[in-house]
Amino acid sequence: MDQYLRNVNYGIYFTVKSKKYIEPPVCEYSGYNLNSNIPIHAVACSLEKMRTEIITETKEEIPKTLVSQSAPRKYELVYRNLITFGYWHVAAIYGLYLCFAEAKWKTIVFDLVLFMVAEVGITAGAHRLWAHKTYKARLPLEILLMCMNSIAFQNTVIDWVRDHRLHHKYSDTDADPHNASRGFFYSHVGWLLVKKHPEVKKRGKTLEMFDIYNNPVLKFQKKFAVPFIGMMCFGLPTLIPVFFWAESWSNAWHINMLRYVTNLNVTFMVNSVAHIWGNKPYDRLILPAQNQMVSLATFGEGFHNFHHVFPWDYRTAELGNNNLNFTTKFIDFFAAIGWAYDLKSVSPELIQQRAKRTGDGTNLLGLKDVAFK
């Protein structure tokens, strides 16, 4: 049986002949980096238990890279992370109570704005700019996005990009830091509470990260991570309400913790919810799915089936579907004033062709498309 599989990272298509074996349900495929012509190897999970024999256009012998989908493992808790995440969430719950009990409305509005700023620092910055290079940014915009990203505090951008590139190259296998094949809790937050899988450590060392390691803005954030991110995420958001409108220290701190934990969890939803629930109009054989709720919460990151098929598209969304995609509008604004440029996107024809070939036949609303009947 012939079927088409894609390279997750670069969207190159190869014809694959599949043979059934009694082995882990993984499919292997290979391609070439469009920028450097360097062979890359990745894995994707198929719905059938099969391994694949690769036939490329050049008929060259390419070494195979196999990673198990979710082999049995012993989890080792990282107690420091367990205690830290536990405190953050308890503090956030108390912050939610304070919003209704005694906090000033200015504090609530201030943290709502901070939530939006921080989220765009992840979506437009760490994700679309630095992890996928879907567009280019001039220095002022890079500095702005680095500061916005620091308010979100999801590790440094360098570490975030490493994990995300690994996620795309080995999506939903044991080399994926937040492997959704291990269930909702693990892919949402559990992966941060246990030691990394050996495959994550092994494959992470093979990633091309020269563009990130040599970025002076990101090197600054990495070098001064503790004082700078600490100030941007926790210090200033607590001090500003106290000194500008006489909010109490407790209210300012705990409501900011609510803001911070909300930022964390809506981002985590992309790794968990959008890999479990939703339709798959572009590739029905992968776990990433379209989830409108996640898109609304993350300003456009929930069109995940599209994103894993076309990761270089700066919109990360389907044709004209920008109503839930504030991040795209943010990038478009800075493109209009010249701070963002070289925005990459996929042609409507290619999107439609791919949907007809490997999609599940659903439309933007998740309903069966009449064109597929």
Image (tube, rainbow, N blue to C red):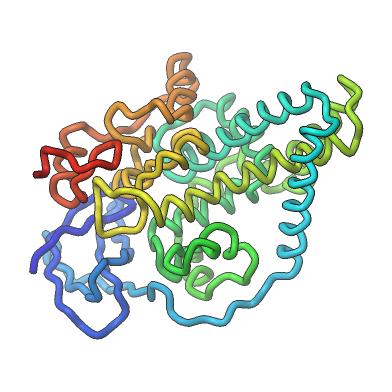
Point out the image quarter for the N terminus.
bottom left
Which residue occupies the extreme front position in the image?
Answer: 101
Q: Quadrant of residue 328?
A: top left
Q: Is residue 315 found left or right of 153 in the rendered image?
A: left
Q: Residue at x 54, y 65 (%)?
A: 186
Which residue occupies the extreme top position in the image?
Answer: 337
Q: Is residue 105 found left or right of 126 in the rendered image?
A: right
Above-or-below relation of 214 to 329: below
> Which residue occupies the foreground of this view, 314 or 142?
314
Q: Which residue is drawn at 78% across and 33% down?
A: 100
Q: Is residue 62 found left or right of 76 in the rendered image?
A: left
Q: Position of residue 132 (x, y in %)?
A: 42, 44
Q: Residue at x 46, y 52 (%)?
A: 273
> Which residue occupies the foreground of this view, 165 or 37?
165
Q: Is residue 49 found left or right of 155 in the rendered image?
A: left
Q: Quadrant of residue 194?
A: bottom right
Q: Position of residue 260 (x, y in %)?
A: 69, 42
Q: Which residue is drawn at 43% across and 79% down?
A: 71
Above-or-below relation of 290 to 148: below
